Image (cartoon, rainbow, N blue to C red):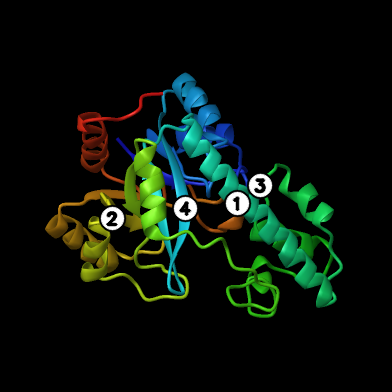
């Protein structure tokens, strides 16, 4: 069974709806997918229901941005109970902080002479979620830049840029705790690709196990074969689950498609079995 367990939709910084992602998966022959939007599960139910219609297995998921000193480490949560009230209250708080961050970046851009408004950005987002890609698109639409890459530079809203605003500083321990309280499985996302930090080594990953980490995203669009093999060995040595996915964002990741990174069926089965065998988990 072909699986891509790292997708984003319009409910975070992707450009396609959950239904459109399902249709793409059908066309690509991908049989299992996970919607891992940033700090929100708003699109999960829509994807689960449409997946049932189309014969696609949908694993409820989420992706949190966390910080260890200056390094931005992403933590994925699989099989989360996306209807649990305490969990929803916590991610709503995180989601609102993302909107405030976007407002602050627009203000900073205005101070740099970039005449776009928050309303302009909202119009391009087409949904409640607003992130940096939407700000970049507003800059392009207003004629200030020609490409997304120009926006994600130190001149504008790239990490550490003149109009950049840091995310809310959730720790890896906090994110893992939130995921596990919602009955989910905590997985380290793309350990080779760490903003403002070095790729994670075995000792660092091992230190996260005491926090409740249960898996590593071994296969990812930012990992070449050598890198994937390296993290696969670490996963085996430490007894961690293996996951993988494209990290597809639609138009916001040009050149990348659903299914460009495939997780083998044996790893999907192990993830599913681990969840089913957990002493306590939530079924939706």
| Pointer 1 local density, CA inside 10 Å: few below 14, some 14–19, many at least 20 | many
Real-space Cα separation, disc 2 to disc 3, in angstroms? 29 Å
- In the rendered image of this protein, does residue 147 appear above or below residue 49? below
Q: Earlier in the sequence, mark 1 or mark 2?
A: 1
Whether residue 230 is visible: yes
| Numbered mark located on residue 64 in the image | 4
Quadrant position of residue 105: bottom right
Give the residue pinned by disc 1: 13
Real-space Cα separation, disc 4 to disc 2, in angstroms? 15 Å
In the picture, the quarter occupied by the C terminus is: top left
Give the residue pinned by disc 2: 211
| Pointer 3 local density, CA inside 10 Å: few below 14, some 14–19, many at least 20 | many
Secondary structure found at label 2: loop
| Front of the two marks 1 and 3 | 3
Give the residue pinned by disc 3: 129
Real-space Cα separation, disc 4 to disc 3, in angstroms? 15 Å
Q: Position of residue 203 (x, y in %)?
A: 21, 70
Q: Position of residue 138 (x, y in %)?
A: 77, 60
Secondary structure found at label 4: strand
| Front of the two marks 1 and 4 | 4
């Amino acid at each position: 069974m072909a699986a891509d367990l790292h997708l984003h939709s319009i409910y975070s910084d992707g450009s396609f709806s959950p239904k459109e992602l399902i249709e793409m998966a059908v066309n690509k022959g991908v049989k299992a997918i996970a919607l891992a939007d940033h700090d929100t599960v708003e699109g999960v139910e829509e994807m689960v229901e449409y997946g049932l219609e189309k014969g696609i297995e949908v694993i409820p998921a989420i992706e949190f941005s966390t910080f260890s000193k200056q390094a931005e480490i992403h933590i994925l949560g699989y099989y989360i109970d996306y209807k649990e009230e305490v969990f929803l209250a916590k991610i709503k708080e995180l989601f609102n902080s993302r909107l405030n961050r976007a407002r602050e970046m627009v203000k900073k851009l205005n101070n740099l002479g970039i005449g776009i408004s928050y309303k302009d950005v909202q119009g391009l987002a087409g949904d409640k979620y607003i992130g940096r890609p939407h700000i970049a698109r507003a800059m392009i639409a207003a004629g200030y830049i020609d490409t997304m890459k120009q926006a994600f530079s130190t001149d504008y809203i790239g990490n550490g840029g003149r109009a950049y605003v840091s995310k809310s500083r959730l720790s890896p321990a906090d994110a893992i705790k939130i995921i596990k309280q919602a009955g989910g499985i905590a997985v380290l996302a793309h350990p080779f690709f760490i903003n403002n930090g070095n790729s994670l080594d075995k000792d660092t990953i091992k230190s996260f196990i005491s926090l409740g980490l249960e898996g590593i995203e071994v296969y990812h669009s930012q990992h070449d074969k050598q890198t994937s093999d390296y993290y696969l060995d670490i996963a085996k040595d430490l007894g961690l689950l293996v996951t993988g996915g494209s990290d597809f964002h639609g138009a916001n990741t040009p050149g990348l498609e659903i299914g460009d990174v495939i997780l083998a069926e044996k790893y999907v089965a192990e993830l599913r079995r681990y969840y089913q065998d957990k002493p306590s988990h939530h079924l939706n």
